[in-house]
Amino acid sequence: MQGNAEPIYLDHAATTPVRAEVIAAMSECHAEGFGNPSSGHSWGRRARRRLEWARASLATALDVPAANVFFTRGGTESDNLAILGRARNAIASGGRAPLVVTSSIEHPAVFEAAEQAAVEGARHAVIGFSGGVFDVDALKAAVRERPVVVSCMWVNNEIGLELPMAEVSEVCREREVVLHSDAVQAVGKIPVSLRDNPVDLLTVTGHKIHGPTGTGALIATDPRGLQPLHFGGGQERGVRPGTEDVAGAVGLAEALRLAVEEVAAESTRLGAMRDTVQARLVARAPDLRINGEGLPRAPHILSLGIPGTDSDTLLAALDAQGIAASGGSACASGSSAPSRTLATLYPGEAAATLRLSFGHLNLERQVDRIVDAVATAIERTRELVRQ
C-alpha cells in the first residue's frame, strides 16, 4: 500500500463486515442462549425462544409468515435446496423427466444445481437475453411444459443487473409454476416486495448484508414439494435437518432487519457514489465499457469491461494501492472459464473485468482516491501488457 493512505474495501458483493449490532445480538446468544433448541430443559427452551424470535423477525422484515422461514447454512445451500429439492422430489415421483428452468446468468449455486438435477434425471432449460433484456417470451414457452421450478435471480451478482421479477412472477403465476429467486444481492440494496412480486421460494444469506457468514434462509410458501438435502433429524420441520445455529439465526435476522429498514437511504447513497465513480472513470478512460449500462442495475455494483489489460494484473495493482475489488463473482475465483453473465450479454467480446461493489464501509470522501487508483491501475497495467 502506498504511503499512509487508508485501505478502501470495494468488494461488498463478495462479503461484508459484520455490523456491531449483529455482533452484540449474537454475543448474547453465545453467552446466555447456548442450549440445544430441541432439548426440553430450560436451556433448550430459552434457545428455542431465541430461534423462533429470529424466525419471526426475519419474516416481518420480508413481510412473509414465520412458518415460511427455514434456516440454512447459507445462500448456496438455500439455492441447492430450492432447485435439487424440487427436482429430486419430482424424480422420485416417477413419470416424465421433470423440467428445471433457469436464466442464463444465474449464480453457480443455482445453475450448477440445475445441471446436477439434469445428471440425476431431470431436464434443464436455460432462458437467455437479447440486447440485455431477459427473454420473457422464451420463458412463457418454457412454462407451458409445466417445469417443477423456475429460478430467476433478483439481482445479478456480477454486474448488478436487475431482472424483471414482476413479469417473471406474473408468467409463473398464470401457469401455477413454482418460482424461485436468489435475492442475495437484492435484499438491502433495492426494495424487495414479495407482495408485488410473489415468489414461492426465496434465498437470502447473512454475509452479504453485514451478517454472519454461514447463515441463510429459504423462504418457502409450501415446503411439501422439497426433498431435503440432508438427513438425520427433524429440525426445521424436516426441511433442513441438523441442530440449528441459534446465534447465527439471530445474527441473520438482525442484519436483515437493519438492511430492510435502511434500504431506501442506503440505495440512494450507494447509487450516487457508484454513478459519480462511473462518470469520472469514463472521463479518464473513455474506452471503458460499463457492463449493464442502460439497463436496470442495483446501486451497489459497478462492473467495468477494460480492454488492453487483464483482470489479475489490474487487481494486483489495486491491491498494492490498498483497494480491494474483484474481477467478478468471488464464487468463480480461480476459474479460467469465461463468465456466463458477460458471455450472455456481450457474446464474442473479450475485455478484462473489474467489479467495484460499494457498501457501508464506503464514504463520499473516498471517491477521489477510488477514481485515481483505478484510473492509474488501468494505465499502468496497459503499459505492462504492451511491453
Image: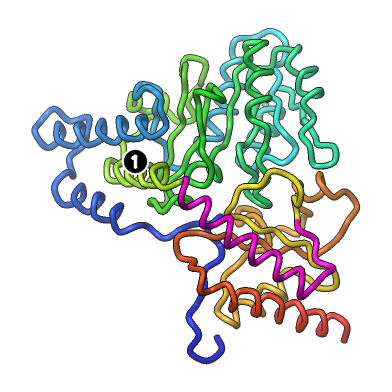
Magenta segment: 264-290
Residue 305 highlighted magenta (yes or no): no
Q: Quarter of the image holding residue 88?
A: top right
Picture quarter with the C terminus: bottom right
Left or right, residue 142 beside residue 24: right
Residue 7 point in image, percent of width and height: 50, 77
Residue 266 highlighted magenta (yes or no): yes
Q: Quarter of the image holding residue 322?
A: bottom right
- Which residue, given by chain and number where applicable, does mark 1 sit on? 253
Please tell me which residue lies in front, 39 or 126. 126
Left or right, residue 262 beside residue 289: left
Left or right, residue 234 beside residue 125: left
Q: Quarter of the image holding residue 303?
A: bottom right
Please tell me which residue lies in front, 257 or 242. 257
Asked whether residue 237 appears in the rendered view, the answer is no
Please tell me which residue lies in front, 288 or 350. 288
Looking at the rendered structure, the secondary structure element under dot 1 is helix
Q: Work out which residue is located at the far left of the displayed protein and give it.
A: 42
**Relative height, residue 379 to residue 349 (above, below):** below
- Residue type marked 1: Ala
Picture quarter with the N terminus: bottom right
**Relative height, residue 139 to residue 133 (above, below):** above
